[in-house]
Amino acid sequence: MSVRRAVRQTQQHIPRNSLVWLLVAQALVIIPHLLHVPLWLVGLWLGCAAWRVQVFRMRVPFPNGWVKAILMVSSGFAVYLSRGSLVGLDAGVALLITAFILKLLEVRTRRDALVVIFLGFFTVVTSYLFADSLLAALYSVLPVIALLSALLGLQQSSYATRPMATLKKAASLFAQAIPLMLLLFVLFPRLEPLWSLPQAKDKGTVGLSSSMSPGDLTELGQSSALAFRARFDGAIPAQSQLYWRALTLPHFDGRSWSISERFGGQAPQWQPQGESLSYS
């Protein structure tokens, strides 16, 4: 009885072929999101991928519960620091990709691999939240075929099939589905996309507002847009004197800064000091 149980557990381990394509698929899924997620996620994926490869080579064990908890909490906190919130389109996609990466460290059996593969298909769809062009659609074919290769690899033994043979089989299955896809594209009614979410168009744009949140500061710091131009009538003053005072937001309610109520929305009166400069 114990021998059968050991054989059954051995057969449940994911084959090398599937693990290779799962790592390739994760890389292809993450690439389109690099313009919208923190770049430290690349380092997180490299670390998790290297760890999982060493686990497969039996050089290191799987991370224990404490290590996984620390990675999960620290990654969530890093997303909060990067996006200023854990709610919203950017933060939600960043959390999804973080979970997609960390889940790699829990892939012990075929069932675990299936969870990561189907999570990868869902993550591919989220790329259309930011770009729905023809080029983006053509690129999404690559991670889909890689995920199909990982799915096919789960049904193979560890060393029976080479990765390229699995890739050809997955591409063949994808090609067989193209006629049905085109038929549905022509006959399916045109509905508003269920995943349409409002996106802030002014994020990362230099400008003045009556309120500002920590996430706005992060996006503003990543913008290289021109704030304004100044032309002096005389000589240009020293760099240390080039300072323009704008809005003062002294009131903080725990989530955002705004104009103090005691000023009634009016800027306070300041006493000018020093030599005045004429500019336009």
Image: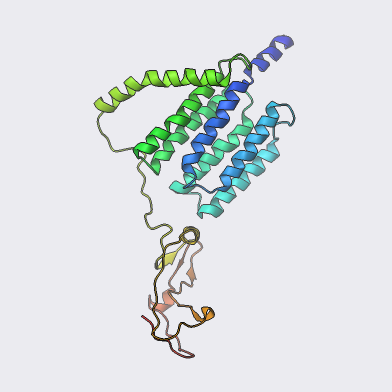
Q: Quadrant of residue 271?
A: bottom left
* Count of number-bearing discs: 0
Residues 203 and 106: in front is: 203
Is 33 rendered above or below residue 175? Answer: below
| Residue appearing at x 47%, y 63% in the figure | 256
Q: Nearer the viewer, residue 67 or 182?
A: 182
Q: Residue 104, percent across and down?
A: 60, 33
Residue 51 seen anywhere in this rendered image of the structure: yes
Residue situated furthest front in the rendering: 235
Q: Position of residue 234 (x, y in %)?
A: 41, 86
From this view, report whether residue 68 is shown above or below residue 149.
below
The structure residue drawn at horizontal position 53% and vertical position 17%, both measured from the top left corner, is 165
Can residue 152 be seen in this snapshot? no
Quadrant including the N terminus? top right
Colour scheme employed for the rendering of this structure: rainbow
Left or right? Give the position of 258 relative to 162: left
Is 1 left, or right, of 102 in this rendering?
A: right
182 shown above or below 211: above
In this picture, is 113 found above or below 161? below
**Relative to 139, 182 lies left or right:** left
Image quadrant holding the C terminus, namely bottom left
Which residue is painted at 47% across and 35% down in the image?
A: 123
Give x and y (percent) for residue 239: 52, 78
Residue drawn at (39%, 73%) of the image: 229
